[in-house]
Amino acid sequence: MSNKTIRIGVFIPYGAQTLDTACVDVLGVMSREYLSAIPQLPAHVSALAPHVSVSYITTPTQGVDIPLTSGMTIRATHSYGDAAVAPGELDVVLVPGPDPSLPLDDDEGALAWLRGQAGAEGVDVLSVCTGLFLCGAAGIADGRRASGPRGLQWMLKERFPGVELVGDEYRWVRDGNFWSSGGVTNGNDLMAAYARASQRWPQPVVEIGLQLTEVEDRGQFYGKGKGPQGELGA
């Protein structure tokens, strides 16, 4: 029986795409809380799953209501200055995509918090779609391979010349503790690849979670069907 808790922080300092944000549920489904509520699953299967806690983190100026696209609003659980979500207190930081036309470097506290998380031992940062703009502004993508939305590779190259962009080909990519994906629903592919590779979840729990959410293996490369989920990078 697993008694550990995987602590996930979803960082939304400037609003985000709803579909980008929703991919956290792929990981949330792989929790004991979720699986134990499914009567068809044997108890010993759900007992393998870790507990999963998800925090929604924003800036002090944003307030508790975080705007997403399509008129959706979610409620923040924390500001980045809270001790409970300080660097090292989380296991995973998910960065869903904001509007890239916004001045994403206005809040140095938010960028410093993200840098601190990326530099903390044992913390993985997962960037979805235009979340790469925020990660780029924080400097945590410099010198790394990164994906990002295919249609905005040119803009990313102009803003962040120190990032090795591979988003024209790669649906998702890993470089050390930094993972990134292409646009919107590619975040689901990133969550699946991360769960399989991270060893935070037992593999039977991962595969059950992916079956329940119907996240299919589209492969790491665009234009290819089902195949082995290879990794790029260490």
Image (spheres, grey):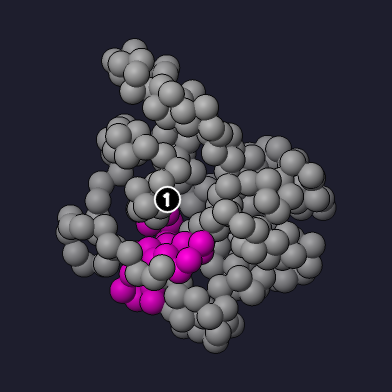
Residue 178 in sight from this viewpoint: yes
In the image, the segment drawn in magenta is: 166-188
Question: Residue 234 versus residue 60: which sits nearer the camera?
Answer: 234
Taking the image as shown, residue 37 lies to the left or right of residue 231, namely right
Image quarter hosting the C terminus: bottom left
- The residue at the point 41 percent across, 46 percent down is 199
Q: Quadrant of the N terminus?
A: top left
Q: How many marks?
A: 1
Is residue 101 visible from the viewing direction of this image? no
Q: Nearer the viewer, residue 158 or 50?
A: 50
Query: In terms of depth relative to the viewer, which is nearer, 88 or 22?
Result: 88
Based on the picture, tell me whether residue 76 belongs to the magenta stretch: no
Which x, y percent locates residue 198?
A: 42, 50
Picture quadrant where residue 114 is located = bottom right
Element at label 1: helix
Asked if residue 199 is positioned above or below residue 139 in the image, the reply reads: above
* Residue 70 at x, y percent in the picture: 53, 47
Residue placed farthest to the top in the image? Answer: 39
Which residue is drawn at the image coordinates 57% and 54% (left, top)?
Answer: 122
Which quadrant of the figure has residue 38? top left
Residue at x-position 42% and y-position 34%: 30
Task: Judge the density around disc 1: few (<14), some (14-19), many (≥20) Cα neighbours within 10 Å.
Answer: few
Q: Position of residue 182 (x, y in %)?
A: 41, 64
Magenta stretch holds residue 172: yes
Is 132 on the left or on the right of 221, as rendered?
Answer: right
- In the image, residue 28 above or below residue 139: above
Callout 1, which amino acid? Ser
Vertical comparison of 216 with 114: above or below = above
Residue carrying label 1: 198
